[in-house]
Image (tube, rainbow, N blue to C red):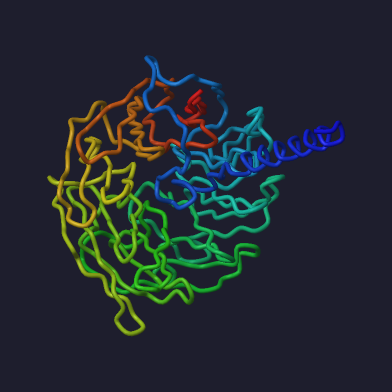
Amino acid sequence: MTGCERRHGTAALALVTVFLTGAAMAAVPDWPQFRGPQRDGRSGETGLLKQWPDGGPKLLWKIEGVGKGYSTVSIAGGKIFTMGDLKRGDSELQYIIALDLKTQKELWTSPVGSPHPSGPRCTPTVDGNLVYAIGTSGDLICAEASTGKVVWRKNFEKDFGGRMMSMWKFSESPLIDGEKLVCTPGGKDATIVALNKNTGELIWRCGIPEIGDRGKDGAGYSSIVISEACGVRQYVQIMGRGAISVAADDGRFLWGYNKIANETANIPNPQVRGDYVFVTTAYATGAALLKLSRDGNAVKAEEVYFLDPKQFQNHHGGVVLVGDHLYGGHGHGEGLPTCLEFLTGKIAWKAEAPAKGSAAVLYADGHLLFRYESGPLYLIEATPESFKVKGRFDPPTGKDPAWPHPVIHDGKLYLRHHNLLMCYELGEK
């Protein structure tokens, strides 16, 4: 090889290295909304620790100052977004909070609405340079992700006759689907609405007909997920009266399932796969798998199985679908780790709860993270064979339950407990 060839070869290698490095950096997906990119509690990241050391993964940083709240974090565009009740001067308000991902420094706060005794529940949804959030009083705002400047705002009660099924106020995390923002005010004539995500203008509204006597009118505590069942793009939600679905194109009501409703709080997100929808709530309710099919221009939902509350009920913290099995915490306020067959409802295994309270569950790289409301975090192998714990640790705790869901981004684990936000190293070295 000549000197010129060596020089060109070195330059080419450097360009390839730069390209591959840039591609690797670009390959790290954002976590732009509640429960991840697909709203299913699943992370696609690999190369994570398969066993935690004694004392847990390495704590990279811990900060205070995100206020009261059960909101977890979204991560997009080099920023961390969350919500919290903060006192600024003599007044306390609910805010969207933006932090720099690298330095954790506060970039901006944008007021949303009135505070709540225990803070907001919504996790901000990020779409390009816009971020969306719903306050506990039904304030829906769109703000610039770079500056926090409010672009538009609505109020569920004033603009849509919105209402909640019970006392804990609005808790939904909004959905962005193409040019639409979709959310659940819970009003009689506007149970679910679609708005132009850039302007807030109404695209369609859907009032839900009577679907049964169980539960209560109004929005629940779940967030909308998208289904493509039987070739119809639809928004599936659990509200005060149970599970419902509306067509994405025009908001027409498709189907309802009342049996899953209770009168106190209907909380977990539905899980969807193909033509199936899995729903569960607690307060002595249970769980069910529904199969959807076309009925002319309509869609019908048929019950495949129903599990009574002694078999499986998820209070909050959700479930995840991995292969042909669902994993989640069973019991009202208990969080017993459970694995069940998605299509049959057969319990593969159920273990005693290793900690107190409900558990928020997240899947990543062959494992489940169970984050208990009492504080501890457990690493559990995602296998239907048996219950296998691969590690546990006790992160620093704040006041009240540790309900915010865990988030994994770029090999790091993010945990929030009210005013505390923590980051741990999960990548294998």
Q: Residue furthest top?
A: 54
**Vertical side of 102 occupied by 196: above or below:** below
**Vertical side of 303 occupied by 298: above or below:** below
Residue situated in front as seen by the camera: 305 or 252: 305
Residue 10 appears at what percent x and percent y?
A: 78, 33
Which quarter of the picture shows residue 404?
top left
Residue situated in front as seen by the camera: 211 or 102: 102
Left or right of residue 105: residue 375: left
Left or right of residue 331: residue 14: right
Residue 285 appears at what percent x and percent y?
A: 19, 52
Q: Residue furthest front?
A: 1
Which residue is located at x 33 percent, y 45 percent?
318
Which quarter of the picture shows residue 216?
bottom left
The N terminus - image quarter: top right
Residue 299 appears at what percent x and percent y?
A: 32, 76
Which residue is located at x 28 percent, y 72 percent?
210
Residue situated in front as seen by the camera: 158 or 275: 275
Residue 77 appears at what percent x and percent y?
A: 65, 43
